[in-house]
Amino acid sequence: MSNGDGEQPPVSESQELKEDAHNPVFNLPPLLVGILAALLLAFVVPAYLLSEDGNGWFIFTFGFIPLRYAVPLSQQGLEWLWTPVTYSFLHGGIEHILFNGLWLMAFGAPVLRRIGTLRFVLLWCISAAVSAFGHAALNWGDVTVLIGASGVVSALMGAACRFAFPSRGGYSASFGHLMPRQSILAALSNRTVLIFTLMWLFGNVLIAVGVPLFGDVGGEVAWDAHVFGFLLGFLFFGLFDRPIRGNLSSESVEHPL
């Protein structure tokens, strides 16, 4: 999974453009539809089908709690094993799901189309864990439960910044997955990527200082998890990207990330 600066897309661009020309932007990959359904189900079941005690058990069992990792593992259950990933499927309300779901459709679709199912699942799990443990490191021993896919969505945004923002033109959700991957420095030199990243960071600064934004669910928002997720997706996308297929130009250069 190397990182190249070549101008060739990972697959035949002309062929896939023809195949995708008849597909609307929101003709989502099946895996993404399944994930969106899972997010909704993970909210509906505890909120409407379980008792208050059952809802509390569900959140405790599948939500991420920093305190778990400040207590000897031998003195607790096994929730510490799966909650660094399962928390990303839980949400605090319909607004929370809609907010993350819209961003997931916009940025998850091109990333999924580009890297495929297995790599996408790995990216989801790893970015969820990195976001969670980054949050835990800054809130060590905190008893507040972390839930939501925002850290993963932020990672997908960071990943998309490496290929879906061509140097000429804006973000492309339909054909962005066909674009060549940019190096980290090239992406940071891309005006569109830079403006998007600065706006994203500004939004998280507002969240950090307590300014409510659309998508907030009334509780404290884990802005730090967003930042760790974005950094993972942006800096390490090359580890998840597919190897470049096709003929590389003579100016192509391979990079580890």
Image (cartoon, rainbow, N blue to C red):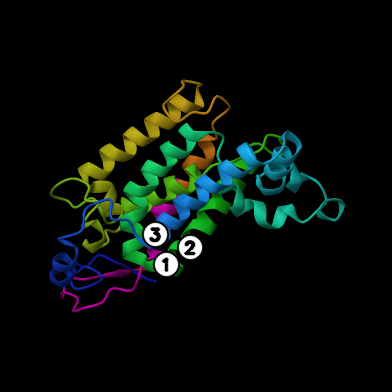
What's the distance in space between the residues labelled 1 and 3, CA to CA?
15 Å
What's the distance in space between the residues labelled 2 and 1, CA to CA?
6 Å
Q: Determine which residue is flagged by label 3.
A: 237
Which mark is in front, 2 or 3?
Answer: 2
* Residue type of the residue flagged with mark 1: Thr
Which mark is in front, 1 or 3?
Answer: 1
Q: Which residues are magenta?
A: 230-254
x and y percentages locating residue 67 in the rendered image: 74, 41
Q: Determine which residue is flagged by label 1.
A: 117
User: Relative to 124, is 194 on the left or the right?
Assistant: left
x and y percentages locating residue 217 in the rendered image: 52, 28
| Identity of the residue drawn at 27% across and 56% down | 163
Q: Are marks 1 and 3 in contact (CB under 8 Å)?
A: no
* Residue type of the residue flagged with mark 2: Val
- Residue 90 visible (yes or no): no
| Residue 240 within the segment the image draws in magenta | yes
Quadrant (top left, top right, bottom left, bottom right) of the N terminus: bottom left
Q: Residue furthest right?
A: 75
The circle on residue 121 is: 2
Circle 2 residues within 10 Å: few <14, some 14–19, many ≥20: some
Mark 2 residue element:
helix
